[in-house]
Image: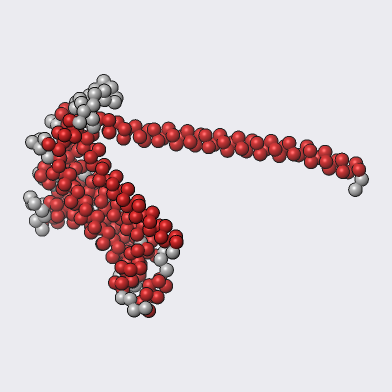
Amino acid sequence: MSRHSEQAIQTTARMKRPESHGLMHDAKKRRILGDVLSYLFLGVMAIIWLIPIVWVFAESFNKNTAPYTKTFFPTEFSLDNYITLFTDRSVLNFPKMFMNTFIVACFVCLISVVFVLSVAYCMSRMRFRTRKTFMNVVLVLGMFPGIMAVSAIYFILKAVGLTSEGMTTIALILVYSAGTGAGFYVMKGYMDTIPTSLDEAALLDGCTRLQVFTKIIIPICKPMIVYQAIIGFLTPWLDFVMAKVICRTQSNYTVALGLWLMLQKEYIQNWYARFAAAAVVISIPIAILFIVMQRFYQESMSGSVKG
């Protein structure tokens, strides 16, 4: 190769090097700008999301119980709202409403987990003639809003005597447990990912179907059990329509009805700040459940990865 050719190649390389360096520099700038804009957007969204939560928490300590004030955040703070919420039972018996909801939520959580696990295992592992028909019917029914069945559910409960005083709690447990049963589709999808060879090996070793279910399937399905437990526990705390239809007296009210009652015109003047206090109190068991279940979820996931 001649000297002129080598010089030409070196000159071309020197010309391309700054150009490629400039392109890399521009790409880095665009990446940094994109990261800054993303974090800025997420920060703004986080602030928007946190403002209502902070306001409810601050309002729960507001000394002024009236709903209309000159400032967005309270200026005077007191614990009277929490004290009155649990001591003044002459107007609204919030502790009774809280216990009603907690009892219903615990039973619904347990029943829904057992029911969903059992149905999902049958649909995933067993083969019978009406299996696909049953799944298709449940899938079609799940497309309709639950509000359409409220009237029918109420008259069924009334026919069997579950709308009378003292039976409302049982009615709520049955309705909420049955409502969460349609969630077996998600559990079944998770079970379908578990190799059937595990079942076959256990059966060859002498295990029964029940032992396969309890000793193999359930431990592997812990993440979905956590998910179903959370859904089952949250339903009674969040539902308003079904509780309003079934519950007739304050002694049977759930917290959703209690919060709604606090905002009625005859109570709102004195119970507005206590409404915020009740909202904070209601969030405590839900937050505890999330924290506890998250630990079990992480342990089960790490165990499955190690296995």
Q: Is residue 145 left or right of residue 191?
A: left
Residue at image position (42%, 61%) is: 304
Residue extending furthest toward the right: 2
* Frontmost residue, 244 versus 255: 255
Residue 129 can be seen, yes or no? no
Residue at image position (25%, 49%) is: 235
Numbered-mark total? 0
Residue at image position (42%, 68%) is: 195
How are the colours assigned in the image? secondary structure
Q: Quadrant of residue 94?
A: top left
The percent position of residue 284, horizontal first and vertical second, equals 26, 43
* Frontmost residue, 219 versus 101: 219
Q: Quadrant of residue 187?
A: bottom left
Residue 130 can be seen, yes or no? yes
Residue at image position (34%, 32%) is: 51
The percent position of residue 116, horizontal first and vertical second, equals 28, 61
Picture layout, residue 104 above or below residue 20: below
Picture layout, residue 130 above or below residue 161: below
The percent position of residue 6, horizontal first and vertical second, equals 87, 43
* Frontmost residue, 210 versus 79: 79
For the C terminus, the image quarter is: bottom left
The percent position of residue 248, horizontal first and vertical second, equals 11, 45
Picture layout, residue 23 above or below residue 68: below
Q: Is residue 166 left or right of residue 217?
A: left
Q: Is residue 229 left or right of residue 154?
A: right
Picture layout, residue 208 above or below residue 4: below
Q: Is residue 152 left or right of residue 48?
A: left
